Amino acid sequence: MNKLKDLRVILVIVLVISWIAAGFLFYYFKTTSDAQLSNKDVEIAELQNSLTQIGELVPAYIVNADVPSGKKVEEADLQLIEVPLSMSTNLVNDIEELIGKHYKIGLTAGTVITSDSIYEEVITSDMRYYDVLVDVVPIGLKPGSFVDIRIKYGTGADFLGIAHRQVAKINGNAIKLIVTEQDIHMFSTMSVENYIFNEIKPFDEVGAYIYAIEYVDGGIQDKAADYFAPSALVQAIMQSDPNMLSREDYSPNDLLLKRKLIEAGLPNIEGATVTDKFREEVQKSIKEGQKIYEKSLEEELKKSQGK
């Protein structure tokens, strides 16, 4: 009987302890939940405040891979995102305003494109793709880069002939550039003089070479001032060339002065002897080219006849 009574006492004690523990746990969890709910309310209020400050979201574009300066903007480069209206200064949100333009500076993947980071290249009626043969190509030169084309004589005289032109393609020492009619005239004189001072006696004792030099960041760097001048004959042709556009940096009188400066440090390259030798070399090159062309025609004919 006493054992049964003791058992009942123990059960009552256990029940009381369980009720106390349950009450404590309920109080603890309620207090914790209230605190958590209160914290959540604070976080929600802070987020709401942040959203209020951020305001409306607007579309913008980022580059999805690194792009170099000078590269044409293509749709494959772009990824549409949303940014706060308050951060939308100078952002471009219309893809039509991007496609076909060029990156003014190199951008890393994930960079948002602004109107300051792109430019539209003005295409004039006299612009052409032109293969410029140079003796020295900058190591690591890539399409989209900007270069100057210069000529250096064995006397140490160095002149810039074609300034700030974008590279379209590179094929060995042939760099395809986007040039103007004036550039073509400039390079014609540079290439002829390069040949004369390297191939014809006594001018090959002076020597010369044409080289390209790359801009650090051609998209944002200003064009260098070209100060090479073609021969008097070429200048006369330029003045009567109907394809020459009116340009602020073209001054016949200025070119005459520049030409005198160039020729002051060089042997006389005028005269029938030089002209005759140069003509002979040109004719020789034309004949060789004709032979190669005729041989290619013969090979095509044999292929068509199944031989």
Image: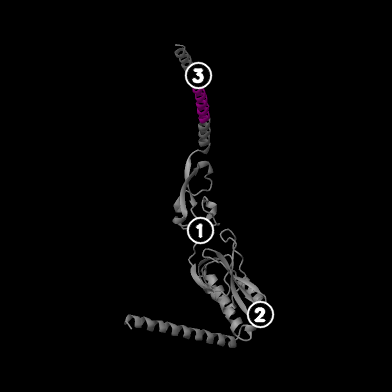
Asked if the stretch drawn in magenta spans residue 33, the answer is yes
Mark 2 or mark 1, earlier in chain: 1
Neighbour tally class for label 3: few under 14, some 14-19, many 20 plus, Cα within 10 Å: few
Residues at marks 3 and 2, CA–CA distance in whole angstroms? 113 Å
Residue 262 visible in image? yes
The answer to whether 241 is drawn above or below residue 65 in the figure is: below
Front residue of 165/12: it is: 12
The disc at residue 102 is: 1
Q: Would you call the spot at circle 1 few (<14 residues within 10 Å), some (14-19), or many (20 or more)?
A: many
Discs 3, 2 touching: Cβ within 8 Å: no
Q: Is residue 220 left or right of residue 155?
A: left
What colouring method underlies this structural image? one colour
The rendered magenta stretch, by its main secondary structure, is classed as helix
CA gap between label 2 and label 1 equals: 41 Å
What's the amino acid at mark 2?
Leu
Circle 1 or circle 3, nearest the eye:
3
Indicate the amino acid at tag 3.
Answer: Ile
Q: Is residue 291 above or below residue 109?
A: below
Q: Which mark is residue 266?
A: 2
Nearer-N-terminus badge (3/2): 3
Q: Which residues are magenta?
A: 23-41
Q: Identify the residue position indicated by label 3 in the image.
A: 17
Q: Measure the alpha-carbon separation of dots 1 and 3.
A: 79 Å
Instruction: Give the amino acid at mark 1.
Output: His
Mark 2 and mark 1 in contact? Answer it, CB < 8 Å.
no
